[in-house]
Amino acid sequence: MAHPRTRTMRIQLRQPALQSMLFEIQKAVNGKNDVIFKVLLAILAGGHILLEDMPGVGKTTLALAISRTLSLSCKRIQFTPDVLPTDVTGFTMYQKQTDSFEFKKGAAFCNLLLADEINRTSSKTQSALLQLMEESAVTMDGVTYPLPDPHIVIATQNPITCVGTQRLPESQMDRFLVRLSLGYPSPEHEIALLKARQNANPLDAIVPAADAEELLAMRHEVEEVYVNDSVYQYIVELIQATRNHPKIRLGISPRGSLALMQMSKACAYAQGRDYLLPDDIAFICADVFCHRLLLHGTDDSLEQTQNIVQEIIKSVPVPDTE
């Protein structure tokens, strides 16, 4: 029997490995537990993360803290208008000594690619990211080169009101599992930040809490989370609601459906469950949906999009899984 949603989910992190990760990342990024938690969920779900915010609020610091906490090889590329696709993917170069062409790997060949200010570069360079984000591989001159596993893209972008920015194409936005925002710190946490930066870099205090092999093992456990048929139906009804809403011009794609399920399963796993609940879906729904939706009219702000997503969550009956 269906029933209306009457409460907000309260997250309790029960996986010891994730608790250790959260503790280490907090050394560099204080007071943003909800965002850190959702970034970890996206990594467990095997997806890429888009951090959108004003410059200087800690987006790059968060990405670097994650790479150190998970012992992942990390490369950073600053996306300016003069960055070329080959800077990302690599290129082939003729070697006179061997009379052959040799492939030189680009920045993408790492576990965690930090794509800083991704919305400042050219469309041609943006297109270089599409294959590697979807297939974890790069094709050059007819040869496909697999990227290291795991492969994660954490991209930062400034709001389009900032000078020199442009909108990312829909095809690329759809490849990000979630879009998150850090926001400004509270006064107490900003004071703690100032004190922590007096004599040292907090990133130097981070010790690894896991490695790539352990992360892949946890991803496998996330994949094994059980999903009831009624929950599958609930996911599809949420998706259909975005495609039929009068204020939405472009609804959620099938890739978005998979993203919602993957993130929800990671949420269940993080709380120590091996089964999915509708509350898991509602908790991360807006983070998965908002950057994928295009609205009619001129008011397509994040706040307006979030309001519509919350309206959809309230309108779709929640299945009784008990």
Image (tube, rainbow, N blue to C red):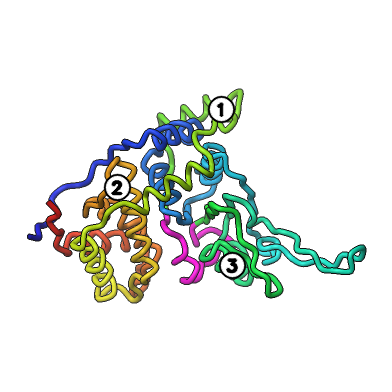
Asked whether the viewer can see residue 311, the reply is no
| Span shown in magenta | 159-179
Question: In the rendering, at what x and y percent does residue 164 appear?
Answer: 59, 62
Labelled pair 3, 2 in contact (Cβ < 8 Å) = no
Comparing 108 with 124, the one in front is 108
Note whether 223 is above or below 270 in the view shown.
below
Asked if residue 60 lies left or right of residue 302, the reply is right
Note whether 257 is above or below 7 in the view shown.
below
The earlier-in-sequence mark between 3 and 2 is 3
* Prevailing SS of the magenta stretch: loop
Q: If the image is split into quadrants, where does the N terminus sit? A: bottom left
Q: Which residue is mark 3?
A: 126
The earlier-in-sequence mark between 1 and 3 is 3
**Secondary structure of the residue carrying numbered label 2:** helix
- Dot 2 amino acid type: Ala
**Secondary structure of the residue carrying numbered label 1:** helix
